[in-house]
Image: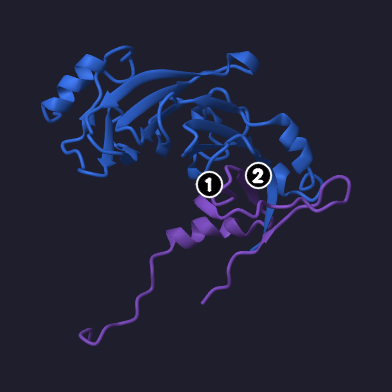
Amino acid sequence: MDWRLAHVYREHTKRVGHVLWHPTAAGTPARAPPCAAAAYVAASASDDARVCLYAANASAAASTAAASTVEEVQRVGCLLSFSTEGKSVSQLSWCAHAGSRAHLATAHADGGVKVWALGGGGGPQRAATLLAHLRGHSGRVLCVSWSLTDPDVLYTGASLSVQFPPLRMACSFSFNAQNLLLQQRFGGGGS
Amino acid sequence: MDKPIPLLPSRGTTGQPATAAAAAATALDVAPDGAMLAVGTADGSVELYARCSGMFSNRAIYLASPPVLAPGPDDS
């Protein structure tokens, strides 16, 4: 089995600690992030506190004619790059639930977990909006995983403890500026 | 033991090999259908690899097939 280098991106300035493909692959564009027209979308997290999104098309990248387009792809750049405005990002987790479209959770070294909505459209409309900043761990958050059964639940693990019951976010994804409510739910042990 | 997967650099339009970063790989993920591979490195670069052949078209068949287990000593 051969693999060919199709895309090289140098958006990060420090170590990349996690890369993660969007859970929907080719053939399911309806659930892909709205900012991505390509079939494959990956996200990367780095110690530079930035998250980057990349789009790719496997058939084009692997074909003989297009396998030589590394330089061309580099000119295009990544799909979206944004600062999480915190310390290094330890891990990422996509929301795979239908209807949520493009939500991404990031775990941070400063003990926080952030939930982002990745904006639709092209060009300058591409943006990441912070939906929630979850606090509760006293140590470095090392891992985050979106529940596969409940779109309102994130599981997180930190260097000092694993939080259980899990963080339960309020009211699906309409939780703008609801940090207080999230904190109460966290303190109450979830539901 | 299987051999490591060869990651072949593609050739640029000018005929020069596209050089993969020499930094250590620190993160890796495979696309759900197995057609794409993403590698993060210690120097901050991210490399996307595409599988050349259609070999993973067999993946669904492989996963759909129940594992064949050899009978144990207690099986009669």
> Could you classify mark 1 by the number of other residues whose Cα lies within 10 Å: few (under 14), some (14-19), or many (20 or more)?
many
In the rendered image, which quarter is residue A137 located in?
top left
- Whether callout 1 and callout 2 share a subunit is answered no
Query: On the picture, is A187 further left or further right than A134?
Result: left
* Residue A70 visible, this orientation: yes
Residue A152 versus residue A163: which sits nearer the camera? A163
Kind of residue sitting beneath label 2:
Ala
Chain for numbered disc 2: A
Query: On the picture, is A172 further left or further right than A37?
Result: left
Q: Residue at x 44, y 58 (%)?
A: B64
Give the residue number, with chain letter if any, for mark 1: B31
Q: Is residue A170 above or below residue A45?
A: above
Q: Is residue A21 above or below residue B9?
A: above
Tell me what hue chain B is rendered in. Answer: purple
Give the residue number, with chain letter if any, for mark 2: A58
**Residue B45: where, in percent of width, then height?**
61, 43
Chain for numbered disc 1: B
Tag of residue A71: none
> Could you classify mark 2 by the number of other residues whose Cα lies within 10 Å: few (under 14), some (14-19), or many (20 or more)?
many
Q: Do the numbered discs 1 and 2 sit on residues whose CB atoms are within 8 Å?
A: yes
Q: Is residue B75 above or below residue A184?
A: below
Query: On the picture, is A66 further left or further right than B26?
Result: right
Q: Quadrant of the C terminus of chain A?
A: top left
Q: Quadrant of the N terminus of chain A?
A: bottom right
Residue A82 versus residue A87: which sits nearer the camera? A87
For label 2, the SS is helix
Q: Is residue A116 above or below residue B44?
A: above
**Residue A25: where, in percent of width, then height?**
53, 40
Tell me what hue chain A is rendered in. Answer: blue
Q: Residue at x 72, y 36 (%)?
A: A74
